[in-house]
Each structure stands twice: as C-alpha cells, then as structure tokens.
Amino acid sequence: MPILVTGSAGRVGSKVVQRLLDQGHAVTGFDLRSSTINHRQYREIIGSFDDRASAAEAAEGASAILHLGAFMSWLPSDADKLHRANVDGTRILLEQAARVKPERVLFASSGEVYPENVPDYLPVDEDHPLKPRSPYGLTKLLGEELVRFFERTSGIPATILRFSHTQDAAELLDPASFFSGPRFFLHPKIRQQEGLGNTAAVGRLRAIDDGRESLVVSCNENGRPFKMHITDTRDMVDGILLALDNPKAAGRTYNLGATAPVDFAEALALMANLTNLPLKTVDLPGSGVFYETSNARIREELGFAPQWTIDRMIAEAAAARAARAKVA
Ligand code: NAD
C-alpha cells in the first residue's frame, strides 16, 4: 500500500519521497507541480489540495498520509489563496483520509503558530501559547485544529510537526533563493523590503549600498544581530521519518528543527570569509528576529539527532556557489 506524500515537488516533500522509495515503499506524490522523480514504485497526482477529485485519487489506498505541502506567502494579496490551499486543502484531504483510513497522518505545521518571532518566553517549547501574527501562521494553526478534529472523530492517530525554517544548504549562498537571498544578500533584501512597503528599512539598506553584491548582517534597532533556527532539509527528513515510524509519535506534537539557533553575525562572518564577498551591517527598525526553539521533546522521545550544523551547511553552500560560478 502506498504512502501519500503531499508537497512532493517541494524542498522537503521531494526528499521524503526519495527516502521512502529507497526504503522500498510505494509512494504517491500529490502536488500542483510535477517532481522529477521517476521510479516504478512512484505515482504522482497533479492537482490542488482543495480539489476533492484530485484529493480522492491521491489518497486512494494510502497506508499513511504525510501532509507536507502548503502554500507559503506573506503578501496580503495572497490571503485567499493561502486559505484555499492550507485550510480548505487540509480539510478536504482529511475528509479523504477519514474515508481510506490510513494507519497514521502526519502534518507539517510551522513555528509561526507561536509565533517564534514574538515569543512570550525563550526557548519556545511546545507548550508556548499559540498566537499567530501572519495569515500564513494562522492557516497552519487552523490546519493543526483540523488535524486534531480528524484524529478525535476518526480514531486515526496523527502527529503534528512544527517545522523550523528549512533550507537546502546550497540555498544559503544563492541570492536568487526565495528565503536566503533576502535574508543574507543586500540587493535581494532591498527588493524584498520594497515589495513589503517597509520604507524605513529600505532607506537604511540603501544607505549602506555601494552597488557591489554584498552580504548583510541584519540587526534590530538596538544593534542586536538576528538569531533564529535554520535547519537543513536532510535533518528535517530524518525527523519526519522518525515520527512516521515510531508509535510513540501518535497523537503527539513536536517542534522539529536544528538544536542551536543561528547567530547572524557569526554565520555571515563565515559566509564572507568563504566567498570573499563584502560584508555590511544594518540596524533595521523594530525589535528584529531573535528566538530559540527547543527540540528537546523530539530528541528525547524519538531520538532525533540533527547532523547539519550551520557551519557545515555554509561550507556546502560556498562549494555550491563556487560550482555555479564555474558553470556561468
Ligand atoms: P515548498 O514550497 O518547497 O514545497 C511546498 C509544495 O507544496 C510545493 O511543491 C507546492 O507546489 C505545493 N503546493 C502549494 N500549494 C498547493 C496546493 N494548493 N495544492 C497542491 N500542492 C501545493 O516548501 P517546503 O520548504 O518543502 O515546506 C514543506 C512544509 O513545511 C510546508 O507545509 C511549509 O508550510 C512547512 N514549513 C516550511 C518552512 C521552511 O522554511 N521551508 C518553515 C516552516 C514550515
């Protein structure tokens, strides 16, 4: 019987599919886009989560459902699309789950349900109050409620994983990366802040721009460098498969991410060192990003042991950047 993986063309989902296939499982992928995976044990349904016919076809015969796909956007204009994909889509997929009765459902939530950016206390653990501030974080919290409702009414055990920010290591030093470009590179950051209408931030960023491609350490208005978790996709895949395989994970909620948060001043100094890119620093308006999330529960209960420290990820990112430059 196949395992259904949604978001199968995505960063995390595609690697979960590959690992399950390597372990000998049959897998069904379900995504708006096709993945490049070609395997005799793999079938793919192309469609939207909120399309009942596609969801029914995807869920057919599933022994487990890993709902890893979602739409991620922080643009106010995307609010309707977010709710259709992440709330209606999750509800419709779970209706199908109740029909086909898999042994387990696993749901990819997010640290934005707390939200980690505005914590009541640190480190953020699973008992932290849930008070999302972004429409995206709200859709993840509603998704969690739908999953627990499904579990209560169907008797099928579910596991919620609150994902850390996740990147493929090679994305970290790619200015075109959706997340890492604006996070670490000056010009993409200016474009992002312009798009979000943050004129004060744009002014401060423009003031340090000398036209060269540069890395930038973001600090808050008091000069405190940002700090947050950035987890390698490979560690996320390990955590997801542990949660799928371990009966102890049934009914549980876990933070899933790297053990130590990333100090932006330290990480960017290493990036600059390995790339010879100029390094700038900017104090942005507001309290900035500064959090630490505890992964103690998943380490203690399921034996999660992340392998990819930020230094290892940056070393791989620098090698990938050098390889891209050679090809160009
Ligand atoms: P991704 O964007 O690489 O993959 C998500 C996939 O979902 C994409 O392939 C996309 O086509 C698909 N998708 C979106 N809307 C869809 C719809 N309506 N119907 C069918 N498919 C749809 O994201 P990722 O980094 O692999 O993230 C995996 C999960 O982790 C998501 O649920 C995301 O919300 C969550 N998450 C990610 C991060 C992160 O930093 N990457 C952080 C916290 C939580």
Image (spheres, rainbow, N blue to C red):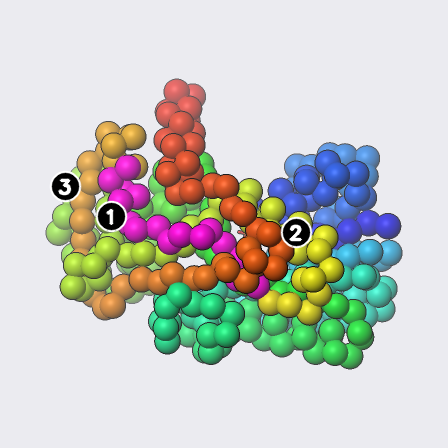
The label number, if any, that marks residue 125 in the structure image: none
Q: Specify which label sits upstream in the sequence, 3 or 2.
A: 3
Between 93 and 23, the one lying in front of the other is 23
Q: Quadrant of the C terminus?
A: top left
Q: Residue at x 63, y 48 (%)?
A: 13
Magenta-colored span: 254-270
Marks 3/1: CA–CA distance: 20 Å
Check disc 3: other Cα within 10 Å, few if <14, some if 14-19, many if 20+. few
Q: Is residue 54 above or below residue 324?
A: below
Name the amino acid, label 1: Ala
The residue indicated by pointer 1 is 265
CA gap between label 1 and label 2 equals: 33 Å
Question: Does residue 25 appear anywhere in the picture?
Answer: yes
**Is 256 a magenta residue?**
yes
Choose top left, top right, bottom left or bottom right for residue 174. Answer: top left
| Residue 231 placement (x, y as % from top left) | 47, 49
Return the disc, 3 or 1, that comes first in the chain's sequence.
3
On the rendering, which quadrant does ligand 1 occupy? bottom right
What's the residue type where badge 3 is placed? Asp
Residue named by callout 2? 242
> Which residue corresponds to the image point at 25% horizontal and 68% vertical from the top-left?
287
